[in-house]
Image (spheres, grey):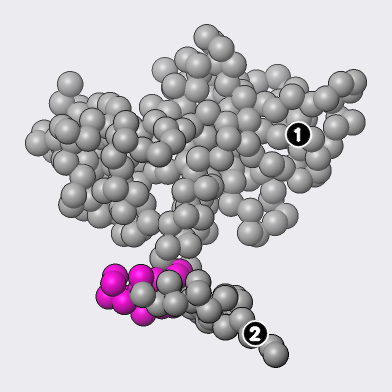
Amino acid sequence: MVVDTTLLYCHCEHMSTVKEERLQIRVGPADKALLVRAAAASHLNVSVFVVQAAASKAEEILAERSSIRLSREAVIAFTEALERPAEVNDRLASTMRRKRTFSWLD
Amino acid sequence: MTELHRPAPLDPRRHHREQFDSGEPVLDEWLRRYAGQNRRRDTAATWVMTDADDVVVAYASVAMTGIDRSAAPETLGKGAPDPVPALLLGRLAVDHRYANLGIGTALTAHVLATAVELNEKAACRAVVVTALNLNAWAWWERLGFHPFEPADPDQLDLYVLTAEIQATLRKTR
């Protein structure tokens, strides 16, 4: 007997102007039932629910990493930058010089 | 002219964040859910800028991180490569009703100054940001951040060195 995993299709919306892409994932029947129930409880369709939940988890992981892993090329470039004498960053300097259009209360 | 409080640590009892709307639902929801000391694991500190009524108009979350260089051990000579201590500016959001006033830049400047201070007292060699999408990536790049992986379009992490921040601040002050 074949116990088939259920397919779940997700629409990944990166930006409203960008064409939607398809992500196909396999899910066991128990997990799928759980997702369907939670989506219904949130008044969302399953696809939207899964994408929102996963995006929020993904964001949290990226925003609070205790370690940033780099590729080989990136390590070499970053190490060279670290070893060079400090230079003024022109783009940063011009940003810092730009006038604020709000004022401080304190 | 809009008047705002200087950046301060988020105080969940004092600062109002229910109406915060940056246009990025993930970031808005994170701020609303934030529960201060009740968070599961407190790995990030949250800074806010607020208006005269203590309503949050922008926030940033920062965490200590390490830049792992083990992918190219030979660049570092002998011994195991230690991670480079850095500050991760993991979230930055400005309420869309306050866009284009330079608020995001002011909050970033605060975090950059924090990195310089940390580097003098302990060690903090860089500030790393992680862009949510290409628009955010372009914003950081304009500000002067460097992409870690310029050749990989899926990699949206950028950095600026603390030494560079220090040299730049000295010149613009």
Q: Taking B133 as reference, is A62 above or below it?
A: above
Report in which chain the residue with disc 2 lies. A
Indicate the quadrant containing the N terminus of chain A: top left, top right, bottom left or bottom right. bottom right
- Residue at 35% across, 34% down: B46
- Residue at 84% across, 37% down: B72
Residue B80's spot in the image, x, y percent? 83, 25
Q: Reply yes or no: does residue A40 show up in magenta.
A: yes
- Residue under pointer 2: A3
Report in which chain the residue with disc 1 lies. B
From the viewer's perspective, is B161 left or right of B107? right
- Decide which of B8, B172 is in the foreground and name it: B8
Q: Which element is circle 2 on?
A: loop
Q: Is residue B31 visible?
A: yes
- Residue under pointer 1: B69
Q: Main secondary structure of the magenta part?
A: helix
- Residue at 39% across, 43% down: B92
Boundaries of the magenta span: A38-51
Marks 1 and 2 close (CB-CB < 8 Å):
no
